[in-house]
Image: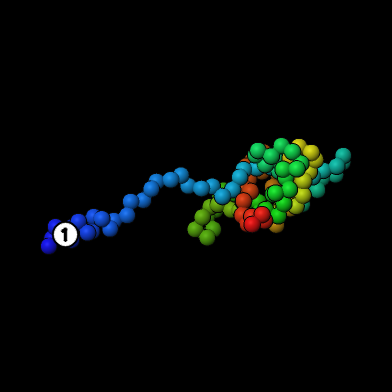
Amino acid sequence: MGKEAADKKASSTRVHKKTQPVRLYTKAVFTGFKRGKSTQHEQFALLKIKGVNQKQDTSSYFGKRVVYIFKAKNTTNNTRFRTIWGKIVKAHGNNGSVRAKFARNLPPRAMGSTLRVMLFPNRSI
């Protein structure tokens, strides 16, 4: 009786297949603010998305959410990480850059840093 129970228990245990975690975002670099010859518009950030090199490729990213994650000095809500969320609104130029509008303007020290472009929700479904 004991051997049958042990065999039943061994056959009912599940074997979990080890897979790589799925990343639901792509990376982008904050290249600067939208600007003219003598003016700078801090409410629009220019982003260069990895793997996007043409204006036609940017249309699939319109409306996607963008997040800038940074580490602060003080702990708040049990974490030192802070986020600033934004949304991609339109293309900028012909080289695959996009404009994003953030809830709070990005700080100038964020220029050159990596942001996350969330790939959900997907509009093609």
| Left or right for 5, reference 104 | left
Report the residue that reaches farthest toward the bottom.
Answer: 1
| Left or right for 13, reference 74 | left
Report the residue that reaches farthest toward the left.
Answer: 1
The N terminus lies in quadrant:
bottom left
- Residue 55: tell me if it is visible: yes
Q: Is mark 1 on a helix, strand or loop?
A: helix
- Residue 111: tell me if it is visible: no
Residue 122 to residue 97: above or below: below
> Of 87 and 52, which appears nearest the observer?
52
Residue at the (73%, 48%) spot, across then down? 59
Residue at the (64%, 57%) spot, across then down? 125
Q: Position of residue 67 (x, y in %)?
A: 63, 51
Q: Position of residue 68 (x, y in %)?
A: 63, 49
Residue at the (20%, 56%) spot, across then down? 7
Q: Where is residue 58 in the image (x, y as percent from the top left)?
A: 72, 45
Query: Which residue does the numbered mark 1 point to in the structure image?
Result: 4
| Left or right for 9, reference 105 | left
> Of 46 and 70, which appears nearest the observer?
46
* Amino acid type of the residue that numbered disc 1 sits on in the rendered structure: Glu
Residue at the (79%, 38%) spot, across then down? 94
